[in-house]
Image (cartoon, rainbow, N blue to C red):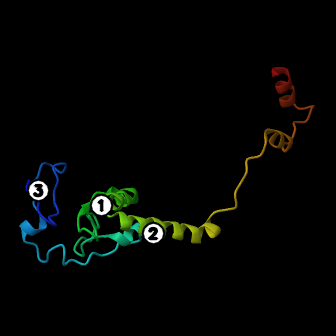
Amino acid sequence: WVKRACAVPLFSYAHGGKSMETTEEKGESGSLNEIEFVFKKGATSVVWNWFGFRPSDTQQSTIFCRTCKRAVVAKGGNTTNLFHHLKQKHFLEYDKAVKAREDASASTSAVVRPKTLTQQTIGTAINSCTPYDKSSKRWGELTNAV
């Protein structure tokens, strides 16, 4: 396989051993540098600002990086893989994405997350229980077991 600038594989050997044809070699209309990628439908993560899909990909199955125009494997929209791509290939963009994620998290944290909860002590838990009636069968069974 010959390495070419901006050549994006359409198939990998993991997909049935097909050839490594690229969009330039197939002669599709418009190179990847000219394509305006569309955003993911229903995306909630900020990382999707750096990734998109071809307009013709109505199933949104092949994710492309808007920065380097490469296909990125992220099965099911796995945003961890998308963040990893940014961290490995575009560190400045990764910093921006992390900051945007933190800002988005901070703005919603007061609304979505409850105040910090603390675990009660064993004594508090035992004292808050309703004791069995001493004349009940269950009280007698537990007393005899201990």
Q: Which mark is residue 64?
A: none
Above or below residue 31? Residue 90 is: above
In x, y percent, where is residue 64? Answer: 27, 66
* Secondary structure under the numbered disc 2 in the rendered image: loop
Relative side of 36 to 127, left or right = left
Q: Which mark is residue 20?
A: 3
Q: Residue at x 83, y 25 (%)?
A: 141
Q: CA distance from mark 3 to mark 2?
A: 33 Å
Instruction: Determine contact: label 3, label 1, CB under 8 Å.
Output: no
Q: Earlier in the sequence, mark 3 or mark 1?
A: 3
Q: Nearer the viewer, residue 102 or 51?
A: 102
Which residue is at 71% across, 54% downward?
117
Please report whichever mark, 3 or 2, sits nearer to the chain's N-terminal start.
3
Could you say where residue 85 lies in the image, as x and y percent from the top left?
32, 59
Q: Position of residue 114 (x, y in %)?
A: 67, 62
Is 108 on the left-hand or right-hand side of 1? Answer: right
Amino acid residing under circle 2: Thr
Disc marking residue 89: 1
